[in-house]
Amino acid sequence: MEQLFKASPEELKEDVIAMLQTIYDPEIPVNIHELGLIYDIQISEDSVVDIKMTLTAPGCPVAQSFPGEIEGKVGSVPGVAEAHVELVWEPMWTKDMMSEAAQLQLGMF
């Protein structure tokens, strides 16, 4: 009988980050992980993913729909049992939170 492989939380986190890198901010042509919008990713032993993220501005037009879209995409990662996204506004996002690659892509160096 074939045994199903269960990824460790660390391995699953790599897959979740890879998925987050395919999701782009609707106004800036950079993925949300490189933009620094993802503040925290926690994965429980039972493969439940909790993400704390922010948006570039509190009045962002996708504030209502974007977290659900991200939950759906992260929830589709093989091995993820559930995904929850919580929008947080502290600390407030700044351009300094972007990765070096994102800053280079946007010509900010």
Image (cartoon, rainbow, N blue to C red):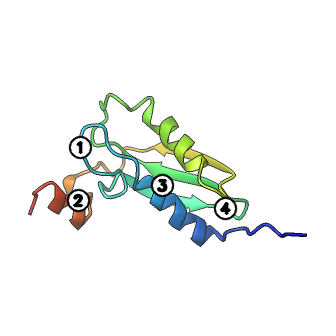
The crowd level at tag 3 (other Cα within 10 Å; few <14, some 14-19, many 20+) is some
Distance of label 2 from label 4 (alpha carbons) = 29 Å
Dot 3 or dot 2: first in sequence order is 3
Q: Are marks 3 and 2 in contact (CB under 8 Å)?
A: no
Q: Badge 3 is on which residue? A: 19
Q: In this view, does 55 lie above or below 30?
A: above
Q: Is residue 84 shown above or below 44?
A: above
Look at discs 1 and 4 and give the one toward the viewer: 1
Determine the CA span between mark 3 and mark 1: 18 Å
| Residue at which label 1 appears | 28
Look at mark 4 in the image and give the residue it sits on. 44
Query: Given contact means CB atoms under 8 Å apart, are the residues at marks 4 and 3 in contact?
Result: no
Q: In this view, does 56 lie to the left or right of 106?
A: right
Q: Which of the image's four quarters has the C terminus?
A: bottom left
Which residue carries the number 2 mark?
102
Q: Which is closer to the viewer, label 4 or label 3?
A: 3
